[in-house]
Image (cartoon, rainbow, N blue to C red):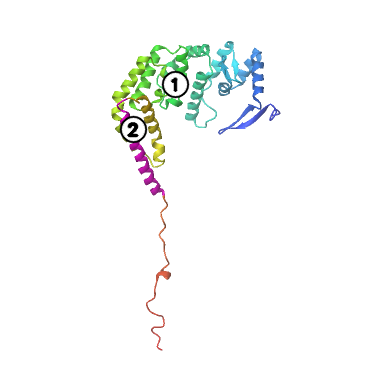
Amino acid sequence: DGMRNSLVVLLQTEESFVWKFKHPTIGDAYGSILRNSSELMEIYIQGSSAEELVDTITCGNVNIQRAVVIPKKFYPLILKKLEQFKFSTRHKTESWSIWAAKRKLYYFLANRCAKDFLELYIETHNSLLDFLERPDLYLEYSPDVRLVIRLNKFGIFPEGNRLRFIKTISDYTVEGSDFHIFENEDLQNIFTENEYKNLKRKVREKFMPNLSDWRFDRQSEYSSSSSAREHMEPHLDSLNLLKKIFARDKYKKEIDEQIDLIHNWIAETDENRSEDLLPRKKLETKSTREDFVESRSIFDDVDE
């Protein structure tokens, strides 16, 4: 606490408070000291949580600025620390905590680890390769996909796993569930040239003739809790991506027609939704006293 606002500052994130070096150069100097002292490096690793380590270290030099580079001799110690990383302390519910921990671990492996560490990690976690064969949807945001790209780039993603991985990606694409393959060149490079051509052919033959049904299915899932435009925006993005991929294809005209139909549906649905959300006018009520019009005077029965 005596270093507060001098060497370090306490920052508030959405879920907790974290200590950070006040100046980046302090972190660089600290990393330099650790690299030159095996004893201090071991103390640093042992005294830090696995969640802190994956945010601050790299296993090998992967050209990340202000990271503490862990030498190869400490890889076994890092592996032991990673075994402890089952839950994220930044999430309160158990399911979210497990999910976040796995996600952070995969990002660490995909972005902050050199080839020799990844080889060692795979040796001790061989089941990881089988798990990576079936990444979840929303491939654009998947750390699994990033890790596969990294392993494949280093030539350490086995052929059998690679074939099953590209089958999963191909199935997502042909089903119309995820077209990320068409905008990520690194992901495309996991495919051979013939495999990628074959994927495009399957999309053309099996998916493109069903564009209308695909649009209708998405529209039928609409809930008025969001706007129609928000609901269909991912669909429009996918159609515009397909339009680029099949720019010279006979289905280009069909894609344009589907885009127009979606825009028309959005306009009509959002207009109806706006009308439904308008506050209803309260019925004006008048008091009986104000509405009552007397037809006779109270003096009518009084003799003059």
Q: In which quarter of the image is residue 175?
A: top left
Q: Position of residue 243 (x, y in %)?
A: 36, 28
Q: Is mark 2 on a helix, strand or loop?
A: helix
Residue that protrudes farthest toward the bottom in the picture: 304
- Tell me the tag on residue 256: 2
Q: Considering depth in this image, is 159 or 244 the residue closer to the camera?
A: 244
Q: Give the range drawn in magenta.
A: 249-277
Q: What element carries label 1?
A: helix
- Residue type at mark 1: give it: Val
- Residue type at mark 2: give it: Asp
- Tell me the tag on residue 145: 1
Q: Nearer the viewer, mark 2 or mark 1?
A: 2
Q: Which residue is drawn at 44% across and 21% down?
A: 145
- Residues at marks 2 and 1 touching, judged by CB atoms closer than 8 Å: no
Q: Considering depth in this image, is 64 or 242 the residue closer to the camera?
A: 242
Q: Where is residue 168 in the image (x, y as percent from the top left)?
A: 37, 21
Is 112 covered by the magenta stretch? no
Residue 202 visible from this viewpoint:
yes
> Which of the image's four quarters has the N terminus?
top right
Q: Considering depth in this image, is 196 or 115 the residue closer to the camera?
A: 196
Q: Residue at x 31, y 31 (%)?
A: 253
Badge 1: how crowded within 10 Å, few (<14), some, or many (20+)? many
Closer to the chain start, of discs 2 and 1, is 1
